Amino acid sequence: MHCNLGSVTGSSARWYKQVPGGVPQHVLRFHQSWSSVEYGSGFSSPKFTSTCSSKSDCNLIISNVEVGDSAVYYCTTWDDSAKEW
């Protein structure tokens, strides 16, 4: 699935999965600078991966999709120009 992060100058894209009635679960963080993936607890490759074609256009790829993968997926980033949390 596709995500456009807009004009935020983030260095990574984060993906979250939320099932109805549940809290968002961290799926993965894709580090654009190194093209590397950091997985959340319970998520791993090759089931989940991500690619970014630019700083703003990223994709979450789910292989061998199953019923349990049904959820709302969110993407976020961090504005690297921010100085504090």
Image (cartoon, rainbow, N blue to C red):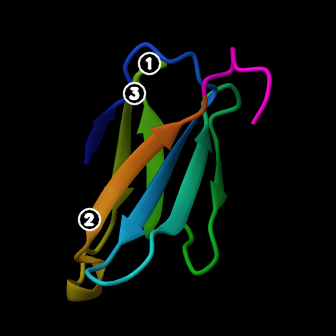
Q: Residue extending furthest front? A: 84
Which disc, if any, is residue 54? Answer: 1
Span of residues in magenta:
79-85
Which disc, if any, is residue 5? Answer: 3
Q: Is residue 71 above or below residue 82?
A: below
- Which quadrant holds residue 2? top left
| Mark 2 → mark 3, Cα distance in angstroms | 17 Å
Q: Is residue 82 above or below residue 16?
A: above
SS at badge 3: loop
Q: Is residue 14 above or below residue 19?
A: above
| Mark 2 → mark 1, Cα distance in angstroms | 23 Å
Estimate the x, y position of residue 48 in percent, counting from the top left. 45, 63
Estimate the x, y position of residue 50 in percent, counting from the top left. 46, 47
Amino acid residing under circle 1: Ser
- Asked if labels 3 and 2 touch by Cβ distance under 8 angstroms, the answer is no
> Crowding near pointer 3: few (<14 within 10 Å), some, many (20+)?
some
| Mark 3 → mark 1, Cα distance in angstroms | 10 Å
> If the image is split into quadrants, where does the C terminus sit?
top right
> Crowding near pointer 2: few (<14 within 10 Å), some, many (20+)?
few
Which disc, if any, is residue 72? Answer: 2
Q: Is residue 33 above or below residue 75?
A: above
Front residue of 74 and 12:
74
Q: Earlier in the sequence, mark 2 or mark 1?
A: 1
Amino acid residing under circle 2: Val
Rendered residue at 32%/59% (across/down) = 73
Rendered residue at 33%/67% (across/down) = 63
> Crowding near pointer 1: few (<14 within 10 Å), some, many (20+)?
few
Q: Is residue 61 left or right of residue 44?
A: left
